[in-house]
Amino acid sequence: MTEAVFNKERHIKYYLRCLKTFLPHQYTSNDSNRMLLAFFTISGLDILGALDSKITAEERKGYIDWLYHCQVPSGGFRGFTGTDFGIDKRTPENDAWDPANVPATFFALVLLLILGDDLSRVKRIECLQWLPKLQREDGSFGEVLGPGGEVKGGRDLRFCCCAAGTRYILRGRSGRGLEGVSDIDVGRLVEFIQACQTYDGGMSEAPFCESHSGLTYCAIGALTFLCRISEDQGHMALLSPGSREFKDLLKWLVSRQTSDLGEDEESDEEDDCPPDRSDGLQRDTNNLSLDEKIALLPNLPPPAEESLHWAGFNGRCNKYADTCYSLWNAGTLVMMDRLSLIDQQRNRQYLLEKTQHIIGGFGKGIGEPPDLLHSFAGLVSLAFQGEEGLSSVDPALCASHRAAQHMESLPWWQETN
Ligand SMILES: [Zn+2]
């Protein structure tokens, strides 16, 4: 077989089309998630090493100004400008209708870092005072504050991760300038996250739900953010090699790699069903003996060597591979320092030969058009594996190490004497 080829120039073209022309109409319903779409686009171009050469200084300034335009006066960022009714009309009675949003705040801050901004216009103290108000009794975080300061939005690990990431960026290593600013309850957040580990080792959206790779990534991302700036967080079982929690999670993550790619689905429509199989499905089997029923089951051949050439990842048991899980699973394993346990070669072959699109970008699965989420996920997964031409990526920030280093140059990241 020929070597799988990473088509870097086409990916750059794809991202530039997304950034500088209109997105396809399917994105219309995502208007309120523009901050997230911006994150995928700008971070993707940065990881491709094309940000400096493909955008002008004026464009960069325009993007930064747009981000600050999304900052609400009381701290935090909105997900798009559509709710902004203007500073003159804003009052304490109506500001719940134009709320700062936890994920948008995290993505806005990472975007500013990627674009090289010094965060000097970020309402740092206001944002860090707003964050604890989003935390619930059980330690979890909501998405926005509704009327009367009520915590609104799902009770799940996505918001825990974005809240921990926002705190990480703005508190920094030294916490300089934050005397008297109340912090989130880290202990209760850790307790909530640990309670989300299920019987099979994976992490679910909330205690007693089904394991899911995306939420597992969020859980380990949140813990990683907490640990990086607090040395007293060493007791976290999920991040401690040798603990049962760590081993169970590892086993579950590694088991997500699969050669079940879902590619037979489409070809089934063209091929006729084998006669014995369709016959068996339509027949009334109530009067048959057990042996006769077993004889009617379709023949499922074991995987041939050829079909094992490609192995992506799924996000839950018994699901087909999907490009985004090459990021969620591999990213979690990078944070656990165990990426070497997966078959990286077959993941690369899956991404480059099965979901990389001819116009650039990656689709969700085989034959699917590229979209921003899956294009970003495919790119980052390859970056974790050291693909030539891609910048190395911080697995928790999902941004280049260059952006992470820029963050560490900010005043509150400097060690205090
Ligand atoms: Zn997906």
Image (tube, rainbow, N blue to C red):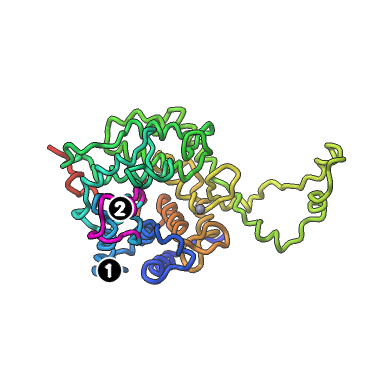
Q: Residue at x 83, y 37 (%)?
A: 290
Up the image or down, 31 lies above or below 242; here it is below
Look at the image and tell me whether residue 359 can be seen. Answer: yes
What stretch of residues is rendered in magenta?
83-103
From the top left corner, tell me how far across and down residue 282 is, in percent: 81, 51
From the top left corner, tell me how far across and down residue 67 is, in percent: 28, 59
Q: Quadrant of residue 18?
A: bottom left
Three-letter amino acid code at the position of disc 1: Glu
- Asked whether 61 or 68 is in front, the reply is 68
From the top left corner, tell me how far across and down residue 210 is, in percent: 53, 38
In the rendered image, which residue does mark 2 sit on? Answer: 94
- Going by the image, does 393 lie left or right of 89? right
Q: Quadrant of the C terminus?
A: top left
- Going by the image, does 390 lie left or right of 346? left
From the top left corner, tell me how far across and down residue 97 is, in percent: 34, 53
In the rendered image, which residue does mark 1 sit on? Answer: 59
Q: Residue at x 47, y 32 (%)?
A: 247
> Which type of secondary structure does the marked residue at label 1 adopt?
helix
Earlier along the polypeptide chain: callout 1 or callout 2? 1
Look at the image and tell me whether residue 389 can be seen. Answer: no
> What whole-number distance in Å separates the C-alpha atoms at marks 1 and 2?
33 Å
User: CB of mark 1 within 8 Å of CB of mark 2?
Assistant: no
